[in-house]
């Protein structure tokens, strides 16, 4: 009889432990299940890498002789815009048309012969350097080559 | 752990003090009791449908992140989703299998309610909203089927929108409204998209809310047989006892859907081409199969009326009877219901099962240039020698017109 008493005490002591164990098991399983649902959903929402390969060279759909001096046009460079400028001196230059400030697309201002961003009044000179306003860095410049009348722009 | 629990409790109390939400909802949940008897198992189907609807909404919203609703982009966007997007196949397959499971459970729910006569007064409005939900689910299935813009879906929609067109006067108007023009085109796709992702889900949501409020108001219906024998074994509280059992069912549903999605992912097939001939062996979704199969067996003319029209009117009448069941099946003076209704329900069930079976086992010519003799033997009732596939497609109607 004297042996039973501690055994019973033991049983009473393990009862809450067992319940706690089952509770924890249920908790872990529930977390696991929500994890198993959440993981594919989050992976799904993150977009797969863009299928369009980054472009290194484009041939523009204009003839070099058709571009007047002191003018600029936007062209497609892969999935981003570029800007082709003929300086008042007659040079052809190309830059990324993405303003380095907040990603607006820049344009050529004939009146001041500079590249201008309309969003926050950023100004770039004809070498792509900062000429005024908030842009923190110069425009990325591309290499322009002529293949006869064709204008070929290459990422330097 | 204790500190965390206390902190969470404090935050919840803070919200409860300001919203009083739990004070509003909990007495309602506690009031609800679920009777226990030998037919109690059917009570789980309604909750299962609420769960499946939520799952369809969730996976549907996820699909919207990549889907492009245009004839030019739809197929490609689904292809991209299946091939490039991580777990895209899983989300789409669960949406597709979930839709099938949901319609299957809708059928079970409806037939169980019919056979247990749960539509008896005062639950007529619950029944009416339920039939409306049934129609909404079929509409969701029909409109969703077209969205991947593949060959099968294109021709199924071609036929499906042609069917109401045989009804005189209003038919052609309905057909043009559905298609957004005379033909199934990109305009149809945009319409079906609008219906599928906004109009029908909104209607379903309102109807489900009304349906659930009515069930809450009247409580669970106890079948007449159980009532007569007094064989009910009391009841259990809805919250938490019944709801926890519901959860187990929902877990099983997730398990089934995940397995189906993993082992049998949703197909995409070929991109729809409006100028390509319909491929042989084209079939509607299984839940429309019995109707298509019935139309196939109708002769071209019955008593001087076009066969298709008779079929369409017949199914229309069946739908009307279904809607009005609570008003037609009145009990006699002793409160007994006539057996004829029960037999009618079993008969309809047998008809649906048999024609669905025929639809899936009937031999269809594998290509259109096979000898017509075989086509005739495959469909003995297509008296004028049109091939079974053509009858199935309802293309015969256009053929006759042109």
Image (spheres, rainbow, N blue to C red):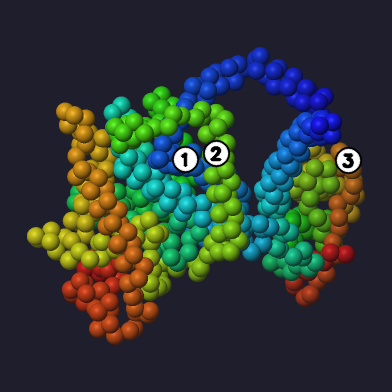
As drawn, is B151 to the left or to the right of A94? left
For residue B235, say whether it is visible: yes
For residue A38, say whether it is visible: no
As drawn, is B185 to the left or to the right of A72? left
Residue at disc 3, secondary structure:
strand
As drawn, is B305 to the left or to the right of A86? left
Could you classify mark 2 by the number of other residues whose Cα lies within 10 Å: few (under 14), some (14-19), or many (20 or more)? few
Q: In the rendered structure, are the residues bearing label 2 and label 3 in contact, judged by CB atoms less than 8 Å apart? A: no
Indicate which disc, 2 or 1, sits on the residue closer to the N terminus.
Answer: 1
**Do the residues indicated by labels 2 and 3 lie within the same chain of the protein?**
no
State how far apart marks 3 and 1 are (Cα). Answer: 70 Å
Q: In the rendered structure, are the residues bearing label 3 and label 1 in contact, judged by CB atoms less than 8 Å apart? A: no
Mark 3 or mark 1, whichever is nearer to me: 1
Find disc 1 in the rendering and name its residue: B44
Q: In the rendered structure, are the residues bearing label 2 and label 1 in contact, judged by CB atoms less than 8 Å apart? A: yes
For the N terminus of chain B, which image quadrant? top right
In the image, what residue occupies the spot 27% across and 57% down? B351
Q: Which numbered dot is residue A132?
A: 3
Find disc 2 in the rendering and name its residue: B245
Residue B151, given in percent of the width and then of the height, sits at: 45, 66
Of residue A85 and residue B62, the one placed in the foreground of this image is B62
Residue B44, given in percent of the width and then of the height, sits at: 47, 40
Of residue A12 and residue B244, the one placed in the foreground of this image is A12
Could you classify mark 3 by the number of other residues whose Cα lies within 10 Å: few (under 14), some (14-19), or many (20 or more)? few
Residue at disc 2, secondary structure:
helix
């Amino acid at each position: 009889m004297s042996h039973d008493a501690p055994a019973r005490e033991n049983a009473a002591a393990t009862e809450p432990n067992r319940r706690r164990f089952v509770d924890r098991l249920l908790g872990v399983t529930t977390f696991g299940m929500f994890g198993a649902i959440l993981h594919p959903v989050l992976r799904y929402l993150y977009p797969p890498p863009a299928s369009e390969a980054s472009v290194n060279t484009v041939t523009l759909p204009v003839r070099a002789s058709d571009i007047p001096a002191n003018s600029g046009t936007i062209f497609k460079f892969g999935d981003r815009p570029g800007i082709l400028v003929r300086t008042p001196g007659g040079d052809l230059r190309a830059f990324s048309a993405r303003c380095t400030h907040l990603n607006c697309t820049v344009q050529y201002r004939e009146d001041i012969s500079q590249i201008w961003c309309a969003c926050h009044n950023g100004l770039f000179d004809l070498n792509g350097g900062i000429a005024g306003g908030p842009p923190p860095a110069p425009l990325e410049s591309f290499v322009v080559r002529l293949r006869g009348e064709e204008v070929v722009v290459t990422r330097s | 752990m204790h500190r965390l629990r206390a902190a969470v409790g404090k935050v919840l109390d803070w919200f409860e003090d300001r919203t009083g939400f739990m004070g509003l909802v909990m007495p309602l949940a506690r009031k609800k009791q679920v009777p226990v008897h030998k037919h109690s198992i059917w009570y789980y189907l309604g909750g299962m449908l609420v769960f499946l609807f939520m799952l369809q909404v969730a996976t549907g919203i996820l699909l919207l992140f990549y889907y492009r609703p245009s004839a030019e982009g739809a197929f490609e966007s689904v292809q991209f989703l299946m091939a490039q997007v991580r777990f895209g196949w899983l989300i789409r397959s669960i949406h597709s299998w979930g839709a099938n499971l949901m319609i299957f459970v809708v059928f079970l729910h409806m037939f169980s309610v019919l056979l247990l006569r749960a539509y008896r007064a005062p639950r007529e409005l619950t029944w009416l909203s339920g039939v409306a939900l049934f129609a909404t689910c079929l509409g969701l299935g029909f409109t969703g089927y077209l969205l991947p813009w593949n060959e099968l879906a294109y021709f199924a929609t071609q036929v499906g929108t042609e069917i109401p067109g045989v009804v005189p006067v209003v038919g052609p108007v309905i057909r043009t409204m559905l298609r957004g023009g005379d033909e199934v085109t990109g305009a149809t796709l945009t319409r079906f998209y609008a219906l599928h992702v906004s109009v029908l889900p909104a209607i379903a949501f309102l109807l489900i809310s009304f349906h659930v409020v009515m069930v809450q108001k009247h409580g669970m219906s106890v079948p007449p047989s159980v009532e007569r024998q007094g064989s009910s074994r009391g009841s259990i509280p809805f919250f938490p006892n019944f709801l926890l059992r519901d959860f187990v069912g929902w877990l099983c549903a997730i398990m089934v859907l995940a397995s189906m999605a993993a082992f049998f992912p949703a197909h995409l097939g070929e991109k729809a081409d409006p100028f390509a001939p319909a491929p042989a062996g084209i079939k509607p979704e299984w839940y429309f199969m019995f109707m298509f199969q019935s139309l196939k067996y109708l002769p071209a003319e019955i008593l001087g009326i076009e066969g298709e029209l008779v079929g369409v009117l017949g199914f229309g009448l069946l739908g009307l009877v279904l809607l009005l069941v609570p008003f037609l099946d009145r009990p006699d003076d002793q409160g007994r219901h006539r057996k004829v209704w029960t037999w009618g329900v079993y008969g309809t069930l047998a008809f649906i099962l048999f024609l669905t079976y025929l639809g899936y086992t009937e031999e269809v010519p594998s290509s259109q240039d096979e000898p017509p003799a075989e086509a005739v033997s495959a469909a003995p009732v297509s008296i004028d020698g049109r091939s079974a596939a053509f009858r199935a497609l309802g293309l015969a109607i256009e053929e006759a017109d042109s």
